[in-house]
């Protein structure tokens, strides 16, 4: 049950990020307020935290002999666990950074230029949009901060779970470090560029 709830919450978070993308493209200034998205994100991550606490408490209380003992142990375990604030979590900070980036973007400028420049950031459209593992076009790319290469998010996460010693699958890459989840970051600018390119090709 806990895994199912967390999966649904993760899907809701992805929908929230997608909404930020659409807001960047079509919304007005009032809609481009990060605090609106932050409040929703805080609630979603709060649900995940509550589920984690409940799951841990259930594991401790499940073998009790009576309902009364179960209830007492479950409540006691819940109260023992420290209260965690969603805003202090790395997940909240990471997703809010992505949402703020999206909301501050000029969608038309991103779509019409071949290079996007920012704070020490430059992206050229020559970067391949093909996932090196599946050889299919990426829809949700993540960037390896060690070598700068991109992969489809779901594919690379599954791959490193199966093979923790996986190195960058780009041929000729000089990165000798194993790919780690901590090395992978969202790149909303690049993702939006890919989406725009796909739309143009379909029209």
Image (cartoon, rainbow, N blue to C red):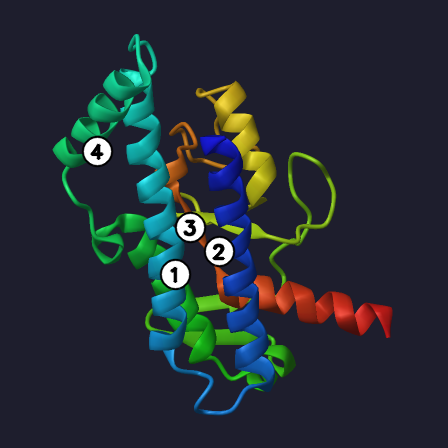
Q: Which residue is mark 1?
A: 41
Counting from the top left corner in percent of width and height, residue 159 is at: 56, 27
Separation (CA) of disc 4 from disc 3? 33 Å
State if disc 2 and disc 1 touch (CB < 8 Å): yes
Q: Earlier in the sequence, mark 3 or mark 1?
A: 1
Q: Nearer the viewer, residue 68 or 73?
A: 68
Task: Tally the numbered discs.
Answer: 4
Q: Which residue is mark 3?
A: 185
Q: Which residue is mark 4?
A: 78
- Above or below 146: residue 116: below
Separation (CA) of disc 3 from disc 1? 18 Å
Counting from the top left corner in percent of width and height, residue 189 is at: 51, 67
Separation (CA) of disc 4 from disc 2? 25 Å
State if disc 3 and disc 4 touch (CB < 8 Å): no
State if disc 1 and disc 4 touch (CB < 8 Å): no
Q: Earlier in the sequence, mark 1 or mark 2?
A: 2
Separation (CA) of disc 1 from disc 2? 7 Å
Q: Which mark is residue 13?
A: 2
Alpha-carbon neighbours of circle 3 within 10 Å: few (<14), some, or many (≥20)? Answer: some
């Amino acid at each position: 049950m806990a895994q199912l709830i967390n999966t649904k919450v993760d899907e809701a978070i992805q929908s929230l990020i997608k909404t930020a993308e659409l807001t960047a493209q079509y919304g007005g200034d009032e809609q481009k307020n990060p605090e609106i998205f932050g409040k929703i994100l805080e609630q979603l991550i709060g649900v995940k935290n509550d589920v984690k606490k409940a799951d841990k408490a259930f594991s401790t209380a499940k073998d009790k002999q009576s309902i009364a003992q179960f209830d007492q142990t479950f409540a006691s375990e819940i109260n023992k666990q420290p209260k965690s604030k969603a805003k202090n979590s790395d997940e909240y900070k990471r997703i809010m950074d992505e949402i703020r980036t999206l909301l501050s973007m000029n969608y038309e400028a991103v779509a019409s230029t071949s290079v996007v420049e920012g704070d020490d950031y430059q992206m050229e459209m020559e970067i391949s949009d093909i996932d090196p593992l599946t050889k299919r076009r990426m829809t949700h790319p993540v960037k390896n901060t060690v070598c700068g290469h991109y992969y489809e998010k779901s594919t690379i996460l599954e791959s490193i779970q199966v093979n923790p010693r996986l190195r960058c699958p780009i041929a000729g890459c000089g990165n000798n470090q194993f790919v780690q989840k901590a090395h992978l970051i969202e790149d909303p600018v690049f993702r939006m560029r890919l989406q725009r390119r796909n739309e143009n090709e379909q029209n």
